[in-house]
Image: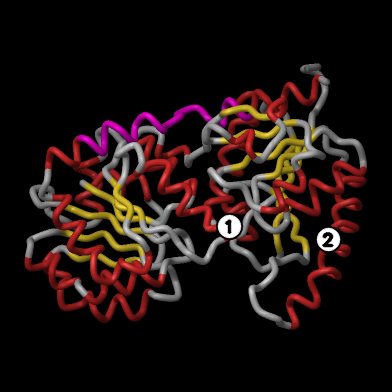
Amino acid sequence: MQKDRIYKFIISGGGTGGHIFPAIAIANAIKSKYNTAEILFVGSKDRMEMQKVPAAGYEITGLWISGLERKLSLKNLMFPFKVITSVLKSLVIIKRFKPDAVIGVGGYASGPLLYAAHLKGIPSLIQEQNSFPGITNKILAGKVSKICVAYENMNKFFPVSKIIITGNPVRQELLDISGKREQAFSFFNLNPDKKTILVVGGSLGARTINESIKNSIESYANNDIQLIWQTGKYYFPNALKVAEQYKDRGIRVYDFITSMDLAYAAADIVISRAGAIAISEISLLKKPVILVPSPNVAEDHQTKNALALSDKNAAILVKDSDANKDLVRTSIELINDKEKMNCLSSNIGDFSVSNSADIIAEEIFKLVNI
């Protein structure tokens, strides 16, 4: 790499925190290794990346693109026009910005931008977070230069010559939470001598998890267990009403937790959806976890993510359909079983990679030298 030259990179994707946080982590790794690099994000208009990326200090532009719905709708009829429009706009963005390489992290915007980069002959890289890739990345696999993955045996889906196992990048503040436990209990106004469960359903919330917690919240209070409960914006008002009567017994409800390092530091166990990035964070921090895979995702990939851990006794899997009757009971049993917690904690640590963003940044730099 010529150090006197300014290199430019486009990072494309988003839609959920599971795509956005790794993208920002990759951008930060690029800047830390090569601080004069220029980075442009490309996301989907009206999605959360349009707020989160600027808040992290990066420029972003939006494409008019969304996914297909599972039922016949006007949005689906518009999909071909959105794809064509987004590819054309991506070609304009590439012509103006002149990137040296393009990185796709998943999400609706990733497809048109990476396809446009392929048309223009620009080196590109996919960061596939799940153990079962979505259809967009499967289609793009033949057109990109490299594919960074978090799980083994991905040669079932991608050309083996392009695959690099890098793990999934996680938020910078989560790389080290040691020594934050006292600060965490103070931040959430909780008792450090009591058992604490962190409940998260992803950045957008999870209906089944929230309903299960709401319906049995008294069980936590009666068992003297504290709760840090992230509901997502949509479910927050209802959850807050239910939890109000238990606030003096350590039940804390939030629509979104910005200080996730402190939430993890306070937690003895975690209840979570089985998104790839959530799993990567929990693995890195070696937290005993109960995973409730969402059934409403492409190719049921969250179940496959969860099975990769539960089959190795590294997590407990509760099916979405069983959550209302089993989730709270299972979590109370787990938090009172120190031996099981230690076993899960030890095993899930085997799935962690602490320097994923740096590894991916190095692979991007290799592309530039081709």
Looking at the image, how many numbered discs can be counted on the residues? 2
Three-letter residue code for mark 2? Ser
**Residue lying at 70% horizontally and 56% vertically, measured from the top left:** 43
**Residue lying at 65% horizontally and 45% vertically, measured from the top left:** 105
Q: Secondary structure at mark 2?
A: helix
**Residue 233 or residue 284, whichever sits in front:** 284
Q: How is the image coloured?
A: secondary structure
Q: Which residue is mark 1?
A: 299
Considering only order in the chain, which callout, 1 or 2, is on the residue closer to the N terminus? 2
- The x and y percentages for residue 232 are 42, 67
Q: Nearer the viewer, mark 2 or mark 1?
A: 1
Helix, strand or loop for the magenta stretch, by majority: helix
The segment highlighted magenta reads 343-360
Using the image, determine if residue 147 lies above or below residue 52.
above
**Residue 319 or residue 344, whichever sits in front:** 319
**Residue 131 or residue 99, whichever sits in front:** 131
Q: Are marks 2 and 1 in contact (CB under 8 Å)?
A: no
Q: Residues within 10 Å of mark 1 (few under 14, many from 20)?
A: few
Could you say which quadrant of the image residue 158 lies in? Answer: top right
Quadrant containing the N terminus is: top right
Q: Secondary structure at mark 1?
A: helix
- Image-based side of 272 in relation to 27, left or right: left
- The x and y percentages for residue 243 are 22, 74
Q: Which residue is mark 2?
A: 86
Q: Is residue 130 magenta?
A: no
Q: Is residue 357 magenta?
A: yes
Could you say which quadrant of the image residue 109 lies in? Answer: bottom right
Quadrant containing the C terminus is: top right
